Image (cartoon, grey):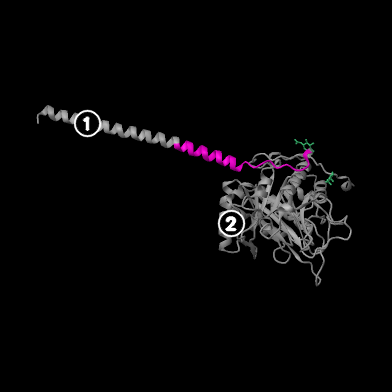
Amino acid sequence: MSNSDQKESLVVYRLKKTSKTQFYAQLFGIFCFGFILSTILVTSIFVAFHFLWSAKPAILLENSKNAFILSGNYTPCNRRIIGWTRLYDKKELTNEQVSKMTHIIFGPITWQFGIIRFRNKMEKEAYERLQEKAKSHDVKLLLSMEIDNEVNDPATNLATIKMIWYLNSFLTTHKIDGIELNWKFPIKNLAQIVYFCEKMRQYNKNMAREFTLALSLPASDIGLNLESIMEHVDFLNIETAEYYSPLHMEHPQLIGPPSPLYSGHAGVENVDSTMTYYGCVTKHPEKLNMKLMFGGRFWKNVRKPIRSSEPLWMLAERYHGSVDGDWMAWKDLEESGWDLKSASWNNESRTPYIYDQLEQNYLAFENERSLLEKIRYAIDKNIGGFVIWKPIFDDDENTLLDVMSSSKFCSTRDNKTVNLDCDVYKQ
Ligand SMILES: *[C@@H]1O[C@H](CO)[C@@H](O)[C@H](O)[C@H]1NC(C)=O
Ligand SMILES: *[C@@H]1O[C@H](CO)[C@@H](O)[C@H](O)[C@H]1NC(C)=O
């Protein structure tokens, strides 16, 4: 082979090589193009499906004059949707549930000789998983501080200061955003609550990040100085889901929903009377949260009332001195045999109920419609938020949580106007 031949073949070889490279490059280009095209196609099909799938029909209340239409998700919520959870719950909050809330109140923890800690390794790990989810959805975590009279009631000012010191270090260590104080009522020393909140706030002011401070209070007036409390707390969680229950200490035989918006058996309060009291006295409706239950309560041995004018407020009969019944989570109602579609509507309390005359069973519960009534009430009265006991009681589709998080409630901003009938509370 001559020198030029050699050169030639080298050129040919190079040519071949380049054309081969070009060929592969083209092939690669076509492949990429196809890949991108198919990705776009698949994504758009997925997105279209997702929208079609998640587009729920607007829920209209029957009263068309006050039509209250749900449209779209408002994230983040401008007001407060707070969920309760326990670290020992078998079912944990899902990412989707967490994303529909603004705050989560969790517990329990233990106190021993002033030291605060998780009760065990399992609950500490449950907390870590919860924290991960809360962080990714920008949801605040509040530690539920159950203050028990015997064990950890800070009876003296010194005990209070010590408690606050330990508490702040626990919150910082575990990246917790604040606390919900849950004093066991009735208590003797109401001034200690005010002192605790005041000192907690003072202590906090000097720290890098200020903790959220919430106080949980019962439905009726306990004589606490609310005006001074309001200077120190971010919000109050009002117990508005315990008016009627077969497990009620004083009147288990009175049948009614966990949270009647209005009316009720004579003498028992309702959501409206409670919120009117707190709103008028504090003058801060926007700092109040209404508690509600995802579920209901049922009574057995319920006979038809003698007077037909009283079907809404019935009584359960006692057998061997006790009332038979229990509470039930929303997700378990249908499985337990209650036909929710057959429910009647109690127009006075704005809640649904089912009365099975044959079996003499009565169920009073919360559903989409009664939640919307409460949401509308909160918007009307400028109430700042809701506390849900508990989001894990919702069904797999998060039906109730969806009603809360996608309603107009979240799209409207805080409004500090007191729009309640306060004449009774004016001196
Ligand atoms: C339900 O209650 C409201 C307010 O009390 C009243 O205006 C309305 O007429 C009632 N509806 C029915 C069907 O009784
Ligand atoms: C605040 O509430 C009052 C009374 O409920 C209402 O008249 C007013 O329009 C509201 N303001 C805003 C900005 O929504």
Asked whether residue 122 is in view, the answer is: yes
Q: Residues within 10 Å of mark 2 (few under 14, many from 20)?
A: some
Q: Which corner quadrant of the figure contains ligand 2?
A: top right
Disc 2 target residue? 127
Q: Nearer the viewer, residue 326 or 103?
A: 326
Residue found at the far bottom of this picture:
320
Could you say which quadrant of the image residue 422 lies in? top right
Q: Position of residue 349 (x, y in %)?
A: 81, 51
Residue drawn at x 83%, y 44% is 420
- Where residue 14 is drawn, which disc sits there? 1
Q: Position of residue 70 (x, y in %)?
A: 69, 40
Residue 68, compared with residue 241, is above or below; it is: above
Q: Nearer the viewer, residue 110 or 167?
A: 110
Placement of the N terminus among the 4 image quadrants = top left
Q: Nearer the viewer, residue 46 or 112?
A: 46
Asked whether residue 233 is in view, the answer is: no
178 left or right of 345 in image: left
Could you say which quadrant of the image residue 245 lies in? bottom right
Q: Nearer the viewer, residue 77 or 346?
A: 346
Q: Which residues are magenta?
A: 38-64
Q: What secondary structure is marked by label 2? A: helix
Q: Position of residue 174 (x, y in %)?
A: 58, 54
Real-space Cα distance between discs 1 and 2? 65 Å
12 left or right of 257 in image: left
